[in-house]
Amino acid sequence: MRELLRNTKSILMLNYKGEEDVKDSNGEYTGEVIIKYYPAKAIRVSVSGARGTSQSEVFGSDIQYDKTLCLSMSDFQKYGIDENTVFFIDKKLEYKDGTPLYNYRVERIADVLNDVVIAVKKVRNNVN
């Protein structure tokens, strides 16, 4: 029922691509890395208004999260979401110096019958 089109909203997600070593102006490695993501993809999911007690049983009581995303198992597999995926929820796609300024990251993923529930945590001032 949560995946009915009227209960979903469009959000943007970026899947983790890998890390890239940073070089200075002389071509020498600095020891720093830049996290790279695939291009943003628009998806439709059911987004909770805020953290609630009905979902806390799914993840246990020791996890801190701000919202949950619910989607079907087939959509979950199609989108390739994992623990390194980041989201733009209620925010426009924004980059600073090539780094995405996302506002949510995956905290935990749980299978619930035919659905997948993803706990996401709000990120403030994300700098990779």
Image (cartoon, rainbow, N blue to C red):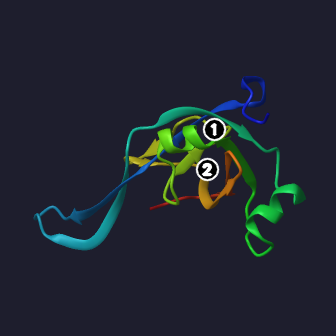
Please indicate whether residue 79 sits to the left or right of residue 29 in the image.
right
- The crowding category of the residue bearing disc 1, from other C-alpha atoms within 10 Å (few below 14, some 14 to 19, many at least 20), is few
Evaluate whether residue 39 shows in this view. yes
Which amino acid does the dot numbered 1 rest on?
A: Lys
Please indicate whether residue 95 sits to the left or right of residue 65 in the image.
left
Please indicate whether residue 47 sits to the left or right of residue 11 in the image.
right
Residue sticking out furthest to the front? 113
For the residues labelled 1 and 2, the Cα–Cα distance comes to 8 Å
Which quarter of the figure has residue 74? top right
Taking the spot 39% from the left edge, 38% from the top edge, the residue there is 39
**Residue hosting label 1:** 91
Nearest to the observer: residue 25 or residue 79: 79
* Disc 2 secondary structure class: loop
Query: Do tag 1 and tag 2 residues touch (Cβ < 8 Å)?
Result: yes
Nearest to the observer: residue 74 or residue 26: 74
**Residue hosting label 2:** 103
Q: Please state, as top left, top right, bottom left or bottom right, where the N terminus lies in the image.
A: top right
